[in-house]
């Protein structure tokens, strides 16, 4: 959130290789620090916190990447290029947990390399792989990446990020940027990432409360569900490349928001079947799925015996567990599929439209602010859903999310006509 505007500003005035290499080097150094966090005799947790913070700072180069794509593609190429980038990002989110699972086979003890005091185990192997891939990225940037800039029509433009200029370059078209559209798109992007972040967060506690899963089961099955959503996202990104040419980015964004709303509406609890109750003072004593009247009777008659197993079910200290109907597994899975369709559609359409609104001018700072708004959403979303869900339950939590999506759709309707490309707005290109 902090680094994105900084790297974006840097990329506006200097070759984009510079912020990319520096940011990746920071990530490599942070991963190496994490691998050696066991070496100091004290304050290890502070070193680990610093390492994770630096990794997050290095991730601010997303703004530079998006601004590069925006400057190197014409309007016709933009959506396809942004979709490809998002698909690669989604693929990374899928493969990351897969590699981590494979590294778990190394075990906690692993292998100790005494010469350089490096312990290779299930915790350090992933960060060492990350450091290696970072070094590989730096090599590719130095040898393959070329500064390239075109206008919205695809004609070569004068490039402030690169000293050499060809004689057939055209000047960057002048004109003011629609700041209302810029702010509105930032708000839309914030809400989209806010909603998906809270959905990711709620998967584990919701499944534990509703289906009496143990923590291990919730993490395992939740991970499988999120991985499946990642695969679904890659498919959606590929489909968007075709649909955007026939339907348009704004219509896809609106359709994605409607699908998200339906997904959370489906998630609202209905009926007279209630979740199993986890007693506050029992380790494992729950009641079967039943009606509310039977819940009260069973609570009154239930024996209170201690067991050594992990407690499962909806904790009785969450008062809403006693009167809120359960969310059936089919409901949850349908909701996950719908959110998995709506989120990638909205995400890629929002920053594709954003890049078109900004036009052929340097977009580093603007992309930095967009990335920062997304980072803020990923911070606030989990906080919001965990507090509301714990205090008031899924009915209130998901009703508020539905209301939030309705307000977002309303905002999109208000600014719909303003979400057009810079060159279209100034009459240089017909939409």
Image: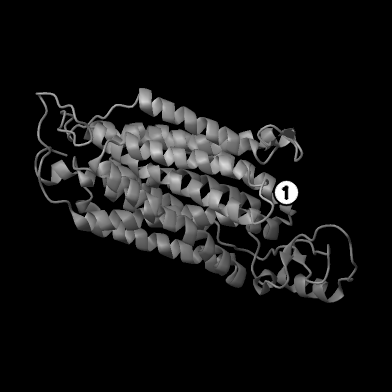
Image-based side of 413 in relation to 265, left or right: left
Q: Above or below — where is 386 with respect to 83? A: below
For the C terminus, give its image quadrant: top left
Regarding mark 1 in the picture, which secondary structure is present there? helix
Residue 23, image x and y in percent?
41, 41
Residue visible at 49% across and 45% down in the picture:
340
Residue visible at 75% across and 63% down in the picture:
276
Between residues 375 and 43, which one lies in front from this camera angle?
A: 43
Q: Above or below — where is 116 with respect to 349? A: above
Image quadrant in which you'd find residue 167: top left
Residue linked to disc 1: 217
Residue 400, image x and y in percent?
47, 66
Between residues 65 and 200, which one lies in front from this camera angle?
A: 65
Q: Above or below — where is 258 with respect to 130? A: below
Between residues 230 and 28, which one lies in front from this camera angle?
A: 28
Image quadrant in which you'd find residue 123: top right
* Label 1 Cα crowd, 10 Å radius (few <14 / some 14-19 / many 20+): some
Residue visible at 34% across and 31% down in the picture:
242
Task: Say if residue 16 shows up in the picture.
Answer: yes
For the N terminus, give its image quadrant: bottom left
Between residues 359 and 109, which one lies in front from this camera angle?
A: 109
Residue 139, image x and y in percent?
42, 26
Residue 280, image x and y in percent?
78, 71
Report the label total: 1
Q: Above or below — where is 237 with respect to 57? A: above
Task: Say if residue 263 shows up in the picture.
Answer: no
What colouring does the structure picture have? one colour
Image-based side of 222 in relation to 309, left or right: left
């Amino acid at each position: 959130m902090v680094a994105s505007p900084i790297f974006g500003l840097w990329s506006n005035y200097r070759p984009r290789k510079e912020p990319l290499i520096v940011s990746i080097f920071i990530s490599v150094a942070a991963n190496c620090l994490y691998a050696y966090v066991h070496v100091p005799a004290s304050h290890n947790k502070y070193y680990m916190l610093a390492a994770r913070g630096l990794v997050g700072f290095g991730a601010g180069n997303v703004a530079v990447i998006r601004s590069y794509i925006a400057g190197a593609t014409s309007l016709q190429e933009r959506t396809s290029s942004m979709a490809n980038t998002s698909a690669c990002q989604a693929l990374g989110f899928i493969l990351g947990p897969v590699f981590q699972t494979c590294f778990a086979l190394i075990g906690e003890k692993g292998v100790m390399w005494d010469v350089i005091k490096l312990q290779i185990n299930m915790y350090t192997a992933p960060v060492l792989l990350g450091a290696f891939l970072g070094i590989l990225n730096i090599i590719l940037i130095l040898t393959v990446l070329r500064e390239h800039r075109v206008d919205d029509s695809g004609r070569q433009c004068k490039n402030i990020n690169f000293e050499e200029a060809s004689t057939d370059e055209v000047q960057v078209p002048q004109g003011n940027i629609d700041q209302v559209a810029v702010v509105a798109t930032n708000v839309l992007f914030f809400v989209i990432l806010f909603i998906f972040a809270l959905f990711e967060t709620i998967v584990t506690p919701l499944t534990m409360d509703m289906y009496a899963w143990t923590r291990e089961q919730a993490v395992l099955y939740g991970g499988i569900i999120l991985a499946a959503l990642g695969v679904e996202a890659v498919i959606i990104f590929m489909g968007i490349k075709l649909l955007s040419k026939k339907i348009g980015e704004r219509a896809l964004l609106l359709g994605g928001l409607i699908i998200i709303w339906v997904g959370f509406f489906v998630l609202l609890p209905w009926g007279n079947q209630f979740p199993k109750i986890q007693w506050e003072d029992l380790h494992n004593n729950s009641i079967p799925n039943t009606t509310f009247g039977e819940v009260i009777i069973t609570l009154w008659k239930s024996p209170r015996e201690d067991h050594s197993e992990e407690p499962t079910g909806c904790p009785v200290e969450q008062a809403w567990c006693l009167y809120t109907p359960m969310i059936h597994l089919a409901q949850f899975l349908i909701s996950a599929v719908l959110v998995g369709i709506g989120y990638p559609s909205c995400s890629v359409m929002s920053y594709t439209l954003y890049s078109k609104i900004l036009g052929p001018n340097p977009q580093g700072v603007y992309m930095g602010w967009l990335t920062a708004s997304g980072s803020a959403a990923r911070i606030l979303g989990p906080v919001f859903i965990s507090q509301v869900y714990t205090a008031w339950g899924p009915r209130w939590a998901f009703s508020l999310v539905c209301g939030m999506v309705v307000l977002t759709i309303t905002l999109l309707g208000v600014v719909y006509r303003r979400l057009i490309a810079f060159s279209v707005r100034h009459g240089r290109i017909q939409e």
